[in-house]
Amino acid sequence: MKRVATIGIIIVICISFVYALYYLYQKNQEDPTIYETEQASIQTIVKKTVATGNIVPKEEVLIKPNISGIIDEIYIEAGERVKAGDLIAKIRVIPNVSALQSAKNAVATAKIDLEAQRKTYERQKALFEKGVISANEFENVDAGFKQAEQNYRSAVQNYDIVKTGTTSGLGSAANTLIRSTVEGMVLDVPVKVGNQVIESNNFNDGTTLAVLADVNEMIFEGKVDESEVGKIREDLPLEVTVGAIENKTFDAVLDYIAPKGVEENGAIQFNIKGTLNKADTTFIRAGLSANASIILDRADDVLAIKEALVQFDPKTQQPYVEIMTGEQEFKRQDLELGISDGIFVEVKKGISKDDKIKVWNQIKPAQFTAR
């Protein structure tokens, strides 16, 4: 029995020895790893974050009527340029029956009072001319007659305003002709002929007849995520690209960051605004979608390497690369790095442009075996 166990142990040892020899043989047959190298280059590195949004006018002016009624005529279309004072629309007043009747009764009452004052005035004038009454008494009667005339004119004007929306002697204070208050381009005309409109007053914003804006003063209005808002500040430069305008970048300056974020789809977003450079005369339609690259930092014409070449010490996290000292021989070289754009990183100290840097994380080509 002992003899069988001994023979079994010897067989196991022989098999292990043969396997070890085979493994060493296979290792010797593998090609040695040959590391490629790259060199540093001169790059312009721009560190930036991207915000999405739209191009909108810096200021939009809403033209509203100062009287309620029905749109009778519209004199403009979207896309036209207008000047201050140009006609926008004409309103036909639809009077309130109760107010119209009240104004009509006021005119009749004022007319009756005027006739009574006129007769009194004529009698007192005749007596004054005969010397029967004093000048003071006649002056009181004359003042009453003139007051009655004024009341009658006011009642007639009020009746005209209630009925037609305007009257003589008031200029543009109550007018059915709506005019532009500023110079600019018509962006939108949200009403049509026949629509009912409401006047703008202390209790109601009123109906918007037209939206005007100066399209030469446009801004980028967008949003950034809460993870990025801490990296930006006002007065940073922007590079704005508009989806509808190919191969064109617009310069802008970030001039507003919202102090409060808004939750959207589970993330907090902060509104930002940037004023586009006025020197660029390219026509941009309001509302076009755009992306703004916010320039956080920039380094022009600096020595840089690919980030993939950088290694980090597992204990100190000190960045370093391995530079070639001989045929497939490398040594560690610590670095002082600057800004990075995610592809290239600035090298402030540690290597020169002529050093050959080991590509340590290169991917070996896949090996295929025949079946």
Image (spheres, rainbow, N blue to C red):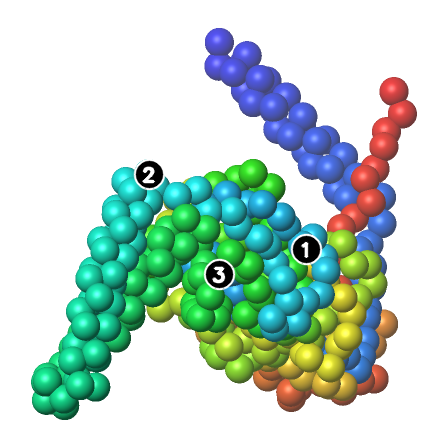
Q: Position of residue 184 (x, y in %)?
A: 65, 69
Q: Residue shown at 61%/58% (left/top)?
A: 88
Check disc 3 and report its element: helix, strand or loop: loop
Query: Which corner quadrant holds the C terminus?
Result: top right
Query: At label 1, which amino acid type do we have?
Result: Ile
Q: Nearer the viewer, mark 1 or mark 3?
A: 3
Query: At label 3, which amino acid type do we have?
Result: Asn
Q: Is residue 324 visible?
A: no
Quarter of the view holding residue 309: bottom right
The tag earlier along the polypeptide, 3 or 2, is: 2
The alpha-carbon separation of the residues under discs 3 and 2 comes to: 20 Å
How many neighbours does mark 3 have within 10 angstroms: few (below 14), some (14-19), or many (20 or more)? many
Horizontal relation, residue 197 to residue 185: left or right: left
Single out the residue that lies furthest toward the top: 1
> Which residue is denoted by mark 2 in the rendering?
97
Q: Nearer the viewer, residue 191 or 301?
A: 191
Quarter of the view holding residue 287: bottom right
Q: Is residue 180 visible?
A: yes
Q: Nearer the viewer, residue 119 or 40?
A: 119
Q: Residue shown at 56%/22% (left/top)?
A: 9
Numbered tag placed on residue 175 in the rendering: 3
Q: Residue shown at 73%/37% (left/top)?
A: 23
The alpha-carbon separation of the residues under discs 1 and 3 comes to: 18 Å
> Which residue is denoted by mark 1 in the rendering?
76
Numbered tag placed on residue 259 in the rendering: none
